Structure formats: structure tokens, C-alpha cells
Amino acid sequence: MNFYIYILQSEKNGKFYVGSTENLEKRLQDHNWSRTPSTKSGIPWKMVYNEVFPSRGEALRRENEIKSKKSRKYIAYLIDKIS
């Protein structure tokens, strides 16, 4: 089974959210249907980036790496890299 890290961007306020999951579609739905308290205020969200990993541990390490940078510039770099 694959695991993913993802970056969402709020269409309302432009903020980013970084997370990990086994199911990208369901997770995006959860964010947009107010099932995630920390992202409720940014609805609607769109998926702007994701990476695939073979294990949950690797996905969590990458999620933490991105979050530890605390940088909109780094997130913009990742998104631009795939465009």
C-alpha cells in the first residue's frame, strides 16, 4: 500500500496545509467537509502537491521535514517544481 504526503492550499485565504494519508481523495474530502478542525476556516481547499512513499514511516518523515522548514518559499518551490 502507498502512503502520501500532500500540500493543500486554501482557495479562501491562500494558506497551505501539509499532511499525510493513505487515501488522497478521501483526505481532501475530509478537509473540505469540515471533518478536520484545523482546516475548517480555510474551506475550500485544493490539492497542489503530493509525493508517494512505500511506507507510512517514510511519508511521516517527509511530512515532518516539510513542516520543520516553516517556509512558504519552500512550499512554493515544491509546487513550482512540478509545474
Image (tube, helix red, strand yellow):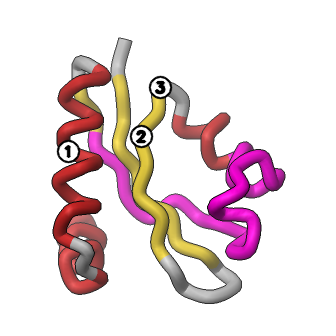
- Picture residue at 24% right of the left edge, 64% below the top: 82
**Residue density around tag 2, few if under 14, some if 14–19, many if 20 or more, within 10 Å:** many
| The stretch drawn in magenta includes residue 48 | yes
The picture quadrant where one finds residue 45 is bottom right
Query: What residue is shown with label 1?
Result: 62
**Residue density around tag 3, few if under 14, some if 14–19, many if 20 or more, within 10 Å:** some
Numbered circle sitting on residue 31? none
In the picture, measured across the screen, residue 4 lies left or right of residue 42, that is: left
**In-front residue for pair 64/33:** 64
Single out the mark in the foreground, 1 or 3: 1
- Picture residue at 54% right of the left edge, 29% below the top: 23
- Picture residue at 35% right of the left edge, 20% below the top: 2
- The quarter in which the C terminus is drawn is bottom left
| The stretch drawn in magenta includes residue 71 | no
In the picture, measured across the screen, residue 14 lies left or right of residue 12, that is: left
What kind of element bears circle 3?
loop
* Vertical relation: 70 (above or below) 19: below
Query: What residue is shown with label 2?
Result: 20
Q: CA distance from mark 3 to mark 2?
A: 7 Å
Numbered circle sitting on residue 22? 3
Q: Earlier in the sequence, mark 1 or mark 3?
A: 3
Q: Position of residue 49 (x, y in %)?
A: 37, 58
Labels 2 & 1 near each other (Cβ < 8 A): yes
Residue type marked 3: Glu
What kind of element bears circle 1?
helix
What kind of element bears circle 2?
strand
- The quarter in which the N terminus is drawn is top left
Q: Earlier in the sequence, mark 2 or mark 1?
A: 2
Residue type marked 1: Arg
Q: Which residues are magenta?
A: 29-51
